[in-house]
Image (cartoon, helix red, strand yellow):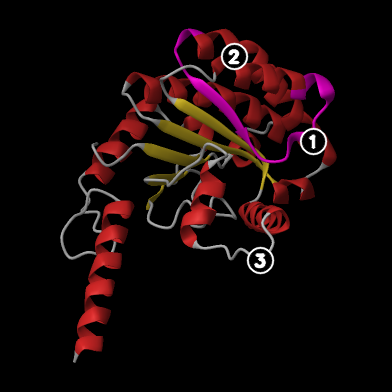
Amino acid sequence: MSTINHVAIIMDGNGRWAKARLRGRTWGHVRGVKTVNKIVSEASKIGLKSLTLYSFSTENWSRPRPEVSALFAILKKYIIRERTTILNNNIVFKILGDISVLPETTKKLIEDLERDSSANSGLKLVLAFNYGSRSEIIHKINSFTINNPGTPVDEEIFGKLISNDGVGDIDLLIRTGGDFRISNFLLWQLAYAELYFTQTMWPDFTVDEFRNILDHVSKRDRRFGMVEPSNGFEVSKRKATKNKKEYNTHQLSN
């Protein structure tokens, strides 16, 4: 698993899982939290560097109001219940997204846990809540151009702006629930991620399946545009830049 350091998961299928059992959609989200706990524990145990979980998207506002309210309440309960576990297991906790919509008590809980876990050196756990990648990209560019008028935005600058949120390049994206799309999630960070889609609904997603996916993907050749397997996107990018410069120099000399 040497090239799999950062895993992102779209935790899909909670509502359909509950509906199949003749229960309300909210029950599926509650049961999904148990899966979150198991996967976070496993990711920390095996030494994964980062785990980013998509818990509420900007598009999820289109869902019924009671379900949205339930998701807000579940987030608050999760932070309260898991605070001690996160701190005791050396986990760094971050929220990615616009939390201005949350109640003040929830925002305070988030801020406290982010601050108190910031010095930890283990797994970086990121919950994407009220998050949409397109809006993130537009916000980052607008903020930069306002503060740096006349300075063009290139890949290096934008990459740093994005990574300031604690989410760098993704090595592997897993989506549960049977759909085959990335749903406006980490579009920039997923540029060279491996993708894995499973039919398993999130409440049924197990540690064993998680391990099997990691094992399967770790055996893929990740070339990042090169002919031979590469140690990472940045390595490939540096070589491409060097080769392009040498090629242009050679063309000019002829």
Q: Residue at x 34, y 19 (%)?
A: 45
Residue furthest left as drawn: 228
State which region is magenta.
Answer: 88-107
What x and y, as percent, mark residue 234? Answer: 32, 53
| Residue in front for this viewpoint, 142 or 102 | 142
Estimate how packed mark 2 is, as few (under 14), some (14 to 19) or many (20 or more) residues with alpha carbons within 10 Å.
some
Residues at discs 2 and 3 in contact (Cβ within 8 Å):
no
Q: Residue at x 56, y 50 (%)?
A: 185
Classify residue 182 as left or right of residue 18.
left
Give the vertical position of 14 relative to 228 (above or below): above
Residue 100's tag is 1
Q: Amino acid at mark 2?
A: Asp
Which residue has dot 2 on it? 116
Residues at discs 2 and 1 in contact (Cβ within 8 Å):
no
Give the SS element for disc 3: loop
- Closer to the N terminus: mark 2 or mark 1? 1
Could one spot residue 179 in this view of the protein?
no
Estimate how packed mark 3 is, as few (under 14), some (14 to 19) or many (20 or more) residues with alpha carbons within 10 Å.
few
What x and y, as percent, mark residue 143? Answer: 70, 53
Residue 117, by quadrant, is top right
Give the vertical position of 101 relative to 91 (above or below): below
Give the vertical position of 157 relative to 216 (above or below): below
- The C terminus, quarter of image: bottom left
Could one spot residue 60 in this view of the protein?
yes
| Residue in front for this viewpoint, 146 or 210 | 146
Q: Amino acid at mark 1?
A: Ser
